[in-house]
Image (cartoon, coloured by chain):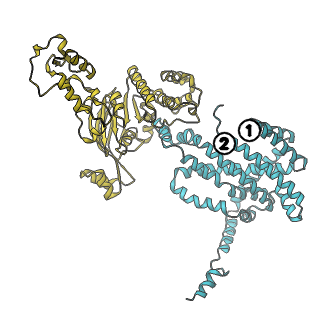
Chain colours: A yellow, B cyan
Amino acid sequence: MSKPKIEIRELTKVFGTKPEPALNLLRQGRTKDEIFQSTGLVVGVNKVSFDVQAGDIYVLMGLSGSGKSTLIRLINRLVEPTAGSICIDGQDVAKLPPAELVRWRRKRVAMVFQSFALMPHRTVFDNVAFGLEIPGERVRSYRDKVMATLDQVGLKAYAQKYPRQLSGGMQQRVGLARALAVDPDILLMDEAFSALDPLKRTEMQDLMLALQREQSRTIFFVSHDLEEALKIGTRIGIMEGGTLVQEGSPHEIVTRPANDYVRRFFKGVDTSRYLTAADLVDRNGPSPEAASFGAPHRLRATTALPDALRTVLGLDQPVGVFDDAERLLGCITAKSLLHKIASTRHVG
Amino acid sequence: MSADFLQDYLGGSKELLPLGALVNDGVKFLLAKGGSFFDVVGGGVESFATHVEVALLAVPSWLLIAVVVALGLWRLGWRFGLFALASLLLISVTGFWAQTMVTLSLVFSATLISLVVGVPLGILCARNDRFNALLRPLLDFMQTMPAFVYLIPAAMIFGLGRVPGILATVVFAMPPVVRLTALGIRQVNNEQVEAGQAFGCTSMQLLWKVQLPIALPTLMAGVNQTIMMALSMVIIASMVGAGGLGNDVLASIQRLDIGLGFESGLSVVLLAIILDRLTESFGARSVER
C-alpha cells in the first residue's frame, strides 16, 4: 500500500485557554468525564490516530458530542489542535504559520457544511466562485470553471438566482459546487446531507459517488447515519467520547463490531445486506470436499447476500464458497443461511 | 449613629460628593489643554457641514422634490411617492423649505460622522469581548443622558453654531449604529464564518466578504435609528444655534405661537417619515435585482 494521504497522530483537542492540566490527566489515561469533573475542561478529541489513503471516502461516525465535528475541523484547523500532528502529503498542517495556513486552505482543501453556509447576498454563481475569488483571481479567469462546476451538479440554469430561491437540496448542490470549484484534493464534508429529506439525501449521495468516479478525491465525511456510511464509505471510523473506538471497511464494521456502542448504530439498519457469501459459511457443519461442488453449486466469497440467497434457495442443496484462489472456505445450506441472517439482524 | 443622621445625609439635598464641580473642572481642563485639538476637529466639522448645507440649498427645490419622489416610487411604490410629493409641497408652500434643508444637512452631517466613527466601533465590539464589555455602559450613558446636557460642554468647547450642535447630535445618535453593527456581525451563522475561513479568507476578507454583507440588514436598521435620533437631536441643538427648523420650534415656544409651532413641527414630522421609510427600504434586502 502506498504512503497514506493523511496521517493523523495523537491528535488532541482540549477546549479552553489553559489546557495543560487536562493534557496531563489525559497522559495518565483518565477519561473525558473524569477530566471534566476534576478540571472543568472539555476534551473534544482525545489522542486520535489514523490514516486516510488517497481516493478514500473516510466516513467518521459517532453520536452527537462524540467529537466527530471537532475532528473534521481540526483537519483544516477551523479548530486549533491542542496536541498531535496532521500530516498531509508529508506536511504537518498543525504546524503551519497563519499566512501559510491561509494559502494551504485556498489550494488544497474545501469544506461542505451541514447548514450549507451559503452567502445570502451572493448569487449562486458568486457563491460557487467564492473560493476562486478569495485568492484574488479575476472573474474572467474563472467564469468557465464556475459554469462547468454548476453544470456538474445540475444547476447551470440557476446561476443568477439567490440561495433563498432554491430548495434545500439545491442549496447543498451549491455548497458542493463551491467546494468542487477550487479543485481541492481533500474534501471535508460535515454532516453534509443530514439536513436533507431522505429522497434528496440519497440523490446527493449518488451525485457525490458519481463525481468521485469522474475524478477521485480524498473525502472525509462526518455522518451519524450508518446507512449513509455503509453506502458511501470506503473506510469507516467510529468515535465515542473523543476517541476512535473502531476503524475498518464497511464490511468489517458490520461483521465485527468492536463493542456495544458500535452495535447501537445497527439499530433499525438491515446490516445483513452488507454480508457476503464468506460471512454466510456454516462453520459448525461438516467440512466438505472441494471437489464435491459442481458448476452451479459454487459461489464466490464476495457474492452479496441477495445473490447467495437466490442460488442456495434455488438449488436446495449445499453450495460451496470459494475465494479468489479457488480455495474452499466452507459450504452454505438453506438452514445455515437462515441462522446467519437471524443472528445478524439488529432490528428493534 | 442615629436614623436622623442617615436621613439628613442620604435623603437630604446636601451634596456630599461634588460630582458636578469635578465635571466642570474636567471640561475646563480639556479646554485648557486640548484647545488646538478641538479647533482642528471643530474646523473640520464646520467646513464639512457648511459644504453640505450650501450644496443642499443650491439644489433647486423642484429637483430635490423630484428626486425624493422618484426614490419613493422606486423603493416603496406609488402611494409613498404621492405622500412624499404632498409632504414636500406642503413644506414648500408653508415657507419652511430653506429651514428644512438646513435641518436635513445637519442630520446628514451628524449621521455621516456617526457612521464613520460608529461602524468601526461596532466591528471592534463584535470581535473583542473585552472592548464590548467596556463600551456597552458608555453607549448606555450616551443614549440615556438627557440630550440637552450634551449641549453645555459642546457649546463651551466649540462655541455656538453648527459644530456643537452636530457633535452633540453625534454623541446622542451614534449608539444604535454601534450596537446594531456589533449585533449584526455576531448574528452571522457560525458555519458561514467557518465557510469563509475554510476557503482561505484572511481576517479582513472575512469581514468584508462575509460578516459585513450578511450583517448589512441589521446594520441598516442601526443607520435608520441613528438618522431618527439625529433628527430629534438637531431640533434640540437649535438651543446652541445649530439653526434650521429647530429655530422656529424654539421661537414658537418663546412667543407661545401655536401656529408657528405646528407648522415647523409638522415639517419635522414629514421629514422624519420620509427619511425613515426611505432608509428602511434600503435595509430590507431585495430578493431579485
Mark 1 or 2 closer to N-term? 1
Please identify the quarter of the rendering in which residue A163 is found: top right
Residue A133 visible from this viewpoint = yes
Residue designated by label 2: B283
Residue designated by label 1: B76
Amino acid at circle 2: Gly
Please identify the quarter of the rendering in which residue B217 is found: top right
Amino acid at circle 1: Leu
Q: Identify the image quadrant of the C terminus of chain B.
A: top right
Residue drawn at x 59%, y 84% as measured from the top left: B6
Instruction: Give the image location of residue A177, x and y in percent.
Output: 48, 27
Tell me if B19 is positioned left or right of A91 in this view.
Answer: right
> How crowded is the residue under tag 1: few (<14 C-alpha within 10 Å), some, or many (20+)?
some
Tell me if A95 is positioned left or right of B289 in this view.
Answer: left
**Vertical order, A347 against B164 (above or below):** above
**Vertical order, B265 against A330 (above or below):** below
